[in-house]
Amino acid sequence: MSRPTTAGRRVPGELVLHPVPLVALAVLLLNDHVLKAAAPGWVTGKLSDVAGLAFFPFLLLAARDVVTRRAPTAAAAQVAAALTALVFAAVKLSAAARDVYVDVVGALRFPVDALVGGVAAPVRVVVQPDATDVWTVLACAVVVLVVRRAVPGPSPRDLVGEQDVPLAVRPWCPQPSPATMRR
């Protein structure tokens, strides 16, 4: 996303501040910390999945942008969405993937859990294995739509070299005159 700042430069990682991931994060936090306790069930479970899957690809792209200093592209958004969807599906469908995931996430959360909750060791997160959750990976596509809209992609002219396109379908090129064709 190449939105200029007041200095006229792009801020690395700014994509995570787009309204879509901010709303997704707000819904995820509200759902996980308020709604699930008030009304546990199918709806709040799926809402967490959709909100998390809508947010996480934006986070991946923002992290890539900060580390590499390369603006998000539609191709990078597709990779972030696919990676998020594959990991989520693996965690929901495979006990081995789920075990790795809960250990890694528990270790990543440990510093915050230790400061806020006073825990002395990483706490494994709880993941409900549910194959019906896999359809929620469709939410990952939101990042692709946002990036495509924010970052203009290449035109068909950029994707196909002029030498590969017959002159009759190259309206941006002047048609050769009969005199130039004889040479």
Image (tube, rainbow, N blue to C red):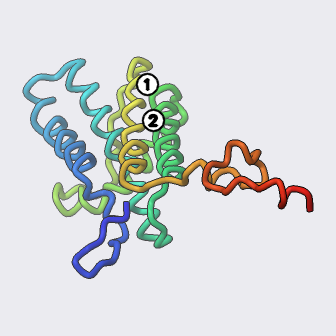
Q: Is residue 44 visible?
A: yes
Query: Residue type at mark 1?
Result: Val
Question: Residue 88 has which mark?
Answer: 2
Question: As rendered, which of 148 and 135 lies closer to the eye?
Answer: 148
In the picture, measured across the screen, residue 80 lies left or right of residue 156, that is left
Query: Residue type at mark 2?
Result: Phe
Quadrant, the C terminus: bottom right
Circle 1/circle 2 CB separation < 8 Å: yes
Which residue is at 52% across, 36% downward? 86
Using the numbered discs, state the Cα–Cα distance from disc 1 to disc 2 in whole angstroms: 8 Å
Q: Quadrant of residue 32?
A: top left
- Count numbered badges in the picture: 2
Q: Quadrant of residue 168?
A: top right
Return the residue at label 1. Answer: 134
Which residue is at 48% across, 56% downward? 73
Q: Is residue 157 above or below residue 134?
A: below
Which residue is at 76% across, 45% downward? 166
